Image (cartoon, rainbow, N blue to C red):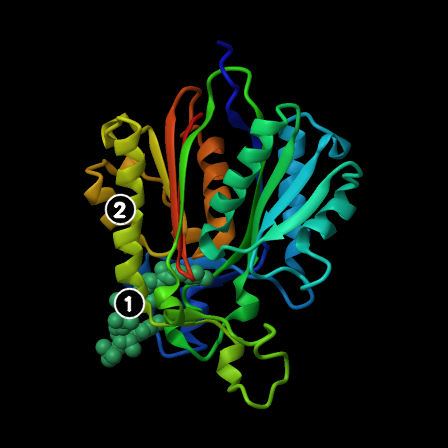
Amino acid sequence: MELRALSSILACGMAVPERILTNADLEKLVETSDKWITERTGIKERHILRQGEVISTYAVQASREALKQASLKPEDLNLILCATLTPDFLMPSLSILVQKELGAVKAGAFDLSATCSGFLYALTVADQFIRNNPNWKILVIGAEALSRKTNWRDRSTCVLFGDGAGAVILGASENQSGIIDFILGADGSNWSLLTLKGGGSAYPPFDPELPEEEYFIKMQGREVFKIAVRMMEKIALELLERNGLSSSDLSLVIPHQANLRIIEYLRERLELPQDKVFVNIHKYGNTSAASIPIALCEAEREGRLKKGDLLLMVSFGGGFTFAGVLMRW
Ligand code: ACO
């Protein structure tokens, strides 16, 4: 029987805004300190859009880098899939803006919203297309501008987020590298712990009924933290167990970069040394759907991923959404 080719990441790219907001800058905005932010989150600085900038600029930049690395032209793309909850506009979608800017004239394009798990959701959706169309090349992007939805008067959230974009090209692999297994999860029972209500159809813009702070991210951080650590561990262990693997088989884990303490908890539960868990939260903060593709791209550039390596990516986000992807590099 002929073995089906797996969907493989052929290339990746990333781009972040030039403007950097440090913890010292935040000390001037709200009552906080570099010490508190570093100890409680691991974040030292984050990249933030300047006024007038748009996140599509960085989504396009990351995509161009990935196309170049894959030696592909925009017209080789069959689909563009962008995970985001902060597109430039509600209409047209961010994927369409990327499609136009690249000149990807043969590609379909749509956005997908699954908060911080968005990139892994998008990757698994793209994987299904590749299974049915092994000749396809799919551009999968995670791009986010949470700084535009941040309440800069709320110290419990404004220290956490950053902006940026990461992109990968998915195609059928010519060897046995690629996506081996995945888990997508959701639990809406605690949705109200993490919200961004304003601007949706329940509360259209300028609704006088809605308090101003509802136009920004609101979060009960401690409760979110507890759910995050539990679900990240559960998904990682389930993926390992059902594939007959143990954590020592993993070459690298790339977790969603939301809080260094959440990442450390996962690392301890998996009994992994520090060099097997990728961390770049100190430079970028939580970039939501962009966090995993940015980390993936940096890991690859730093030589942390070698052919044949077993990679686990795991995420959680508002909703709540959860996702894990196990792949052979
Ligand atoms: N600077 C100084 N003090 C602060 C700050 C700050 N920036 N923020 C909160 N505090 C204070 C609080 O007021 C509180 O003071 P009190 O004890 O006098 O009441 C104290 O610090 C402790 O507050 P907690 O909220 O309990 O702090 P915690 O240790 O839980 O850290 C944090 C807060 C960093 C938000 C953490 O809970 C966390 O990371 N949660 C998960 C967030 C997350 O991962 N979200 C991901 C989803 S994002 C998305 O989907 C878009």
Q: Position of residue 256 (x, y in %)?
A: 40, 49
Q: Position of residue 283 (x, y in %)?
A: 44, 52
| Within-10-Å neighbours for mark 2: few <14, some 14–19, many 20+ | some
SS state under label 2: helix
Which quadrant of the structure image shows residue 270?
top left
Which quadrant of the structure image shows residue 128?
top right
Residue 300 vertical placement versus 189 (above, below): above
Residue 173 vertical placement versus 313 (above, below): above
Which residue is drawn at the image coordinates 25% and 53% (left, top)?
Answer: 230
Q: Position of residue 163 (x, y in %)?
A: 54, 57
Q: Along the polypeptide, which appears first: circle 2 or circle 1?
A: 1
Which residue is drawn at the image coordinates 59% and 55% (left, top)?
Answer: 18
| Within-10-Å neighbours for mark 1: few <14, some 14–19, many 20+ | few
Q: Which mark is residue 83?
A: none
Q: Is residue 36 visible?
A: no
Judging by the rendered image, the residue that carries numbered circle 1 is 223
Q: Relative to 188, is 122 on the left or the right?
A: right
Q: Relative to 321, is 113 on the left or the right?
A: right
Residue 66 vertical placement versus 201 (above, below): above
Where is ligand 1, by quadrant? bottom left
Judging by the rendered image, the residue that carries numbered circle 2 is 233
Q: Quadrant of the C terminus?
A: top left
Q: Mark 2 is on which residue type?
A: Glu
Residue behind label 1 places its C-beta within 8 angstroms of ligand 1? no
Residue 14 vertical placement versus 158 (above, below): above
In this view, the residue in front, 298 or 119, is 119
Q: Is residue 56 visible?
A: yes
Q: Mark 1 is on which residue type?
A: Glu
In this view, the residue in front, 142 or 156, is 142
Tags 2 and 1 touching, CB below 8 Å:
no
